[in-house]
Image: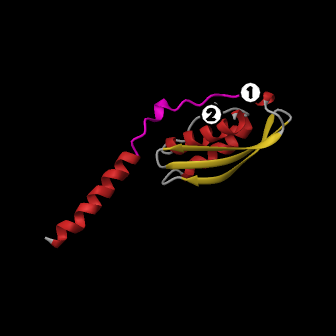
């Protein structure tokens, strides 16, 4: 009987973790802001997509993104999505492919960048 009381909290925690991962990523739409309309400054943006949490600082100078600093990326298995940052800087656009296997983290990073420059 004591073994049952041990497994019940594990089952509950597993169910909570399963629900936390159930995010409809197709509903997360990333815009493509006009960086030339953004005044020179460094802007902070945050995003939370399911269990993924991202904070970025985006520096815009002369209408282009000069740098994106990843301040926080609580990612689970999505660390590989961090390669999306240099792609955004190179493209000067948020219209870049998400990283396969790290779609949630990719979208969270893109959304944080978008929020930084549009708030």
In the image, 100 versus 63, the foreground residue is 63
Residue 4 in which image quadrant: bottom left
Query: Dot 2 corresponds to which residue?
Result: 96
Looking at the image, which is closer to me, 40 or 88?
Answer: 40
Q: Is residue 7 above or below residue 97?
A: below
Image quarter hosting the N terminus = bottom left
Please give the range of residues in magenta: 21-34
What percent of the width, then of the height, locates residue 46? 62, 44
* Vertical arrangement, residue 118 with respect to residue 42, above or below: above
Cα distance in 3D space between marks 1 and 2: 15 Å
Q: Quadrant of the C terminus?
A: top right
Q: Residue furthest front?
A: 119
Residue 40 forms part of the magenta stretch: no
Q: Residue at x 51, y 48 (%)?
A: 52
Q: Which residue is mark 1?
A: 34
Main secondary structure found in the magenta portion: loop
| Sequence-wise first label, 1 or 2 | 1
Measuring 63% from the left and 41% from the top, which residue is drawn there? 112
The figure's colour scheme reads secondary structure
State the image coordinates of residue 13 (x, y, percent, origin top left).
33, 57
**Residue furthest toward the bottom?**
2
């Amino acid at each position: 009987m004591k073994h049952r009381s041990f497994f019940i909290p594990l089952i509950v925690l597993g169910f909570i973790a399963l629900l936390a991962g159930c995010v409809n990523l197709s509903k997360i739409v990333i815009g493509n802001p006009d960086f030339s309309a953004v005044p020179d400054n460094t802007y902070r943006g945050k995003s939370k997509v399911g269990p993924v949490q991202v904070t970025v600082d985006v520096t815009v100078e002369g209408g282009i993104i000069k740098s994106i600093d990843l301040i926080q990326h609580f990612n689970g298995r999505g660390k590989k999505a961090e390669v999306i940052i240099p792609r955004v800087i190179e493209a000067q656009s948020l219209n870049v492919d998400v990283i396969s296997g790290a779609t949630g983290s990719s979208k969270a990073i893109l959304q944080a960048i978008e929020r930084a420059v549009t708030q």
